[in-house]
Image: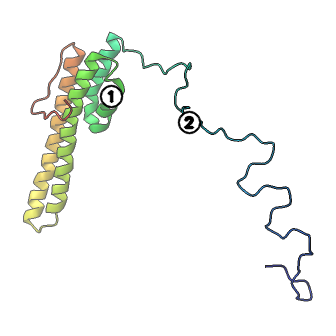
Amino acid sequence: MTDPTPDGVPNQPQPGQPQPGQPQPGQPYAGQPHPGQPQPAQPQPGQPYAGQPQPGQPQPVPAAPLTAQEDNQWAMLSHFLNIILLIPALIIYIVFKDRGPRVAVESKEALNWTINVSGAVIILNILAAILGFIPIIGLIIGLLVVLLVWAVIIVNIIFSIIGGLKVKNGGSYRYPVNYRWIK
């Protein structure tokens, strides 16, 4: 719409003048590159796309293997950090499993244990929340389930410390009653 003049009659563009919002003669439309600017490279058939390694370029180097001391340290930490539950053992397993043989075995064992413990804690908490809505009997059973959650957490802490100490002293540790999700 055009702006009205003081007398209330809308301004009409003069013939040959560009209208507002229209591109000026010789100017590109929005989204089109300006003349003289470099055009974005278009991949040719048979050429690799951006992000793919180009022939003749150096390939990424895998991470260096761990020293014996580092391998033992990360294996030990994978057990000790199970106290926090799932996340540390998962990170250690993903990052270091291919860099040291000892950390590969011990972090897998620790991760399998913490998957089981974390699952038990989650299921027991859901059960306690559901049973908490049942009058009297549900409240008593819900409190027992909460005590069971704490028992699982305490057992996890004890076994994690035992596992970390055994690995620190050069041994290997296998958790009792551990379903191995990761083979």
Give yes or no for contact between labels 2 and 1 (Cβ–Cβ under 8 Å): no
x 9%, y 66%: residue? 136
Q: Which residue is most to the left?
A: 137
Residue at the spot of label 1:
92
Displayed quadrant of residue 111: top left
**Element under disc 2:** loop
- In the image, residue 113 lies at what x, y percent? 19, 33
- Between 147 and 12, the one nearer to me in the picture: 12
Residue kind at label 2, given as amino acid type: Pro
Question: Image height check: is 41 above or below 78?
Answer: below
Q: What is the crowding at mark 1: few (fewer than 14 residues within 10 Å), some, or many (at least 20)? A: many
Question: Image height check: is 180 above or below 55?
Answer: below
**Element under disc 1:** helix
Classify the position of the C terminus by image quarter.
top left
Please report whichever mark, 2 or 1, sits nearer to the chain's N-terminal start.
2
x 20%, y 27%: residue? 109
How many discs appear?
A: 2
x 24%, y 16%: residue? 168
- Between 152 and 143, the one nearer to me in the picture: 152
Q: Is residue 76 left or right of residue 26?
A: left
Residue at the spot of label 2:
45
x 34%, y 18%: residue? 99
Q: Is residue 7 left or right of residue 76?
A: right
- In the image, residue 54 lies at what x, y percent? 55, 25
Q: What is the crowding at mark 2: few (fewer than 14 residues within 10 Å), some, or many (at least 20)? A: few
